[in-house]
Image (spheres, rainbow, N blue to C red):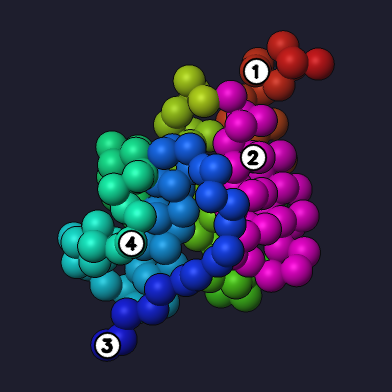
Amino acid sequence: MTTKTIHANPSKNRSPRHRAREFALQGLYQWLLNNEDSGVIDAHIRQAHGFDKADREHFDILLHGAINQSIQLREAFADLIDRPLVELSPIEHAVLLIGAYELKNHIEIPYRVVINEAVELTKSFGGLDGHKYVNGVLDKLAAKLRPAEIAAGK
């Protein structure tokens, strides 16, 4: 089985946490395409150029958390997507898993930050208008998962 790596040309001024999200996206992409063991994916990603500048703890939390909770996360956004899950691009699917995981499990990260980071990941790695789709789905998911935070922000 071949291992695929996604590449983009994002800005060099990325925070360690944003880099962690980029590497988690790469790992989830591999997992979605090859169904590899998360430990194998983790070891491979840690060897990638630039990993030393990522927030390693957040990478671990995102990669393993999104994989371990993938069924629940998909159930959380299944009624918010307009197509069967198998028709999502692997990038959109992976970004939605990351965004859903952070919305559900990391209330210390403001929902607007979660959505913005997901949109930026999709702009960097995804298709032409994928970021608009991810934005819409995660906005609706935030309303489901964090209604008090959204109400407080209005």
For the point 28% across and 42% down, which residue is it?
56
Mark 3 and mark 1: span between their CA atoms?
A: 44 Å
Q: Position of residue 103 (x, y in %)?
A: 53, 34
Q: Do the residues labelled 3 and 1 touch (CB within 8 Å)?
A: no
Disc 1 target residue: 149
Q: Is residue 118 magenta?
A: yes
* Circle nearer the viewer, 1 or 4: 4
- The one of 44 and 107 positioned closer to us in this rendering: 44
At label 2, the amino acid type is Ile
**Going by the image, does 70 lie left or right of 75?**
left
Q: In this view, does 109 lie above or below 134?
A: above
Image quarter hosting the C terminus:
top right
At label 3, the amino acid type is Met
Q: What element carries label 3?
A: loop
Q: Is residue 146 above or below residue 129?
A: above
Displayed quadrant of residue 24: bottom left
Q: Is mark 1 on a helix, strand or loop?
A: helix
Disc 4 target residue: 49
* Circle nearer the viewer, 3 or 4: 4
Disc 3 target residue: 1
For the point 58% across and 36% down, which residue is it?
114
Q: Where is residue 2 in the image (x, y as percent from the top left)?
A: 30, 86
For the point 60% across and 72% down, which residue is it?
89
Q: Where is residue 10 in the image (x, y as percent from the top left)?
A: 58, 57
Mark 3 closeness class: few <14, some 14–19, many ≥20 residues within 10 Å: few
